[in-house]
Amino acid sequence: AVAAHVAVYGLVLAVCITGYLSSAHTRWDTVFWWTIEFPRIAAPSEELNEFWGELHMWTAWALLGIIAVHVSGAIYHAFRNDGIVRRMMRW
């Protein structure tokens, strides 16, 4: 369970960082939800944008996969009625 949580949080961080690095290598500024403009940290580079964009896509798919496994595990424990879900929900 600890490894799964570390993987989820690590992948969330990796998706955010790779997405920012991909957008940092474009000609356009990076704006967070149309309000906060991030500083430009790199010169435009199509090769680096493609590299970080590809890595961003694969980390996002890995995150979706680990979330699916995590939810499947919660459903499994809910049907087993072994008290794990009760511990998670703090009822």
Image (tube, rainbow, N blue to C red):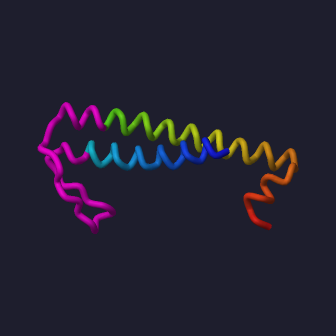
Q: Position of residue 11 (x, y in %)?
A: 47, 44
Seen from this angle, which residue lies furthest right? 81
Seen from this angle, which residue lies furthest front? 2
| Residue at point 27%, 45% (across, down) | 21
Judge whether residue 31 is colored magenta: yes
Q: Tell me the magenta residue range.
A: 23-52
* Quarter of the picture holding the N terminus: top right
| Residue at point 87%, 49% (across, down) | 82
Q: Position of residue 70 (x, y in %)?
A: 65, 44
| Residue at point 81%, 50% (across, down) | 78
* Quarter of the picture holding the C terminus: bottom right
Judge whether residue 39 is colored magenta: yes
| Residue 10 vertical position relative to residue 58 in the rendered view, above or below | below
Q: Position of residue 31 (x, y in %)?
A: 26, 60
| Residue 90 vertical position relative to residue 60 in the rendered view, above or below | below
Between 6 and 45, the one nearer to me in the picture: 6
